[in-house]
C-alpha cells in the first residue's frame, strides 16, 4: 500500500531524561543519548492515539524481536522514500537497531508504521 496524502504525524524517539523537549514543529525524529535507558515515543497526530488504542494488539502478542525486525525494515523503507523525495516523507527517522528501546517503544513504533500504511 502506498502512503499518499498529507502526513501530519511527527515521530520522535527521545530519552525521558533529556533536557530538550520535542515541539510540534520539529520534523526530524531524534533519539537523545543520555545515561537513561528509558525512551519515549512521541507521535504528533491527533488521530494516532485513538487509532492505536482501537487497533493494537497487546505488546506481548509478538516478541520484541518481531517488532524490532519489522521496525528496521519499515525505517529503511521510510528513509528510502525520504531520499527519493516522495511527498509526505520529508524527514528521515533516526532509528538505531543496536539500541534496546524496549518492548513498549518497539510495539508503538510498529503500530505507527501500520497507521501510516506500511505492511
Image (cartoon, rainbow, N blue to C red):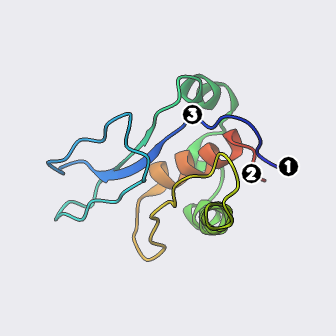
Tell me the residue that label 2 is attached to: 118
Q: CA distance from mark 3 to mark 1?
A: 18 Å
Badge 2 element: loop
Tell me the residue that label 3 is attached to: 8
Q: What residue is shown at x 47% (from left), y 48% (from top)?
A: 104
Q: Residues within 10 Å of mark 1 (few under 14, many from 20)?
A: few
Q: What residue is shown at x 40% (from left), y 67% (from top)?
A: 100
Q: CA distance from mark 3 to mark 2?
A: 16 Å
Q: What residue is shown at x 51% (from left), y 55% (from top)?
A: 91
Residue 43 horizontal side relative to residue 111, left or right: left
Residue 114 horizontal side relative to residue 21, left or right: right
| Badge 2 or badge 1: first in the primary sequence | 1
| Badge 3 or badge 2: first in the primary sequence | 3
Q: Residues within 10 Å of mark 3 (few under 14, many from 20)?
A: some
Residue nearest the observer in this picture, 38 or 63: 38
Tell how many labels. 3
Q: Would you place residue 21 above or below residue 84 in this image? A: above
Residue nearest the observer in this picture, 118 or 82: 82
Q: Residues within 10 Å of mark 2 (few under 14, many from 20)?
A: some
Tell me the residue that label 1 is attached to: 1
Callout in the foreground (3, 1): 3
Q: What residue is shown at x 59% (from left), y 22% (from top)?
A: 50
Amino acid at each position: 500500500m502506498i502512503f499518499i496524502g498529507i502526513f501530519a504525524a511527527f515521530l520522535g524517539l527521545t530519552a525521558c531524561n533529556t533536557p530538550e523537549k520535542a515541539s510540534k514543529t520539529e520534523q526530524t525524529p531524534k533519539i537523545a543519548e543520555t545515561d537513561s535507558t528509558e525512551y519515549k515515543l512521541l507521535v504528533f497526530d491527533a488521530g494516532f492515539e485513538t487509532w492505536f488504542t482501537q487497533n493494537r494488539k497487546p505488546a506481548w502478542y509478538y516478541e520484541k524481536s518481531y517488532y524490532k525486525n519489522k521496525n528496521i525494515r519499515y525505517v529503511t523503507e521510510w528513509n528510502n522514500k525520504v531520499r527519493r523525495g516522495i511527498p509526505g516523507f520529508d524527514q528521515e527517522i533516526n532509528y538505531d537497531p543496536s539500541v534496546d528501546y524496549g518492548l513498549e517503544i518497539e510495539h508503538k513504533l510498529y503500530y505507527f508504521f501500520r497507521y501510516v500504511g506500511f505492511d
